[in-house]
Image: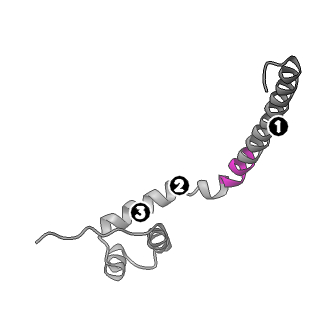
Amino acid sequence: MKRIRRKFSASFKAQVAIEALKERSSLSELSKRFKVHAVQISKWKQEFLQNASAAFGSEESHQDVEQEKQQLYAKIGQLEMERDWLKKNLNQLGLIK
């Protein structure tokens, strides 16, 4: 019979990885408790440790996004003013109705 592949949520993976990091239980005990293979738990733990710095670096990237957003809004405002000026002047010349 064909087995259905299980999909785990990110929060479940994080929970299992944190439990593995605590080292209160062995990998075999954790695999029985969470019904996940021990190798998979080790991979999740390793991935969790590799991406741990992202949890503390999000503030900088958030500030960069906000700054870029403000620059884009300023550019949009400038372009709208230029468009309105062109419309007005071309309308006065009779080129646009």
Is the Cβ of the residue at disc 2 closer than 8 Å to that at disc 3?
A: no
| Camera-nearest residue between 14 and 74 | 74
Residue 26 sits in quarter: bottom left
N-term mark: 2 or 1: 2
Question: Element under label 1?
Answer: helix
Type of amino acid at the residue the image marks with label 3:
Trp
| Camera-nearest residue between 57 and 27 | 57
Which residue bears the numbered disc 2? Answer: 51
Q: Is 35 included in the stretch rendered in magenta?
A: no
**Up-down relation of residue 30 to residue 39 (above or below):** below
Residue 16 sits in quarter: bottom left
Magenta extent: 57-64
At which x and y percent is residue 31?
33, 76
Which residue bears the numbered disc 1? Answer: 77
Determine the CA span between mark 2 and mark 1.
Answer: 39 Å
Which residue bears the numbered disc 3? Answer: 44
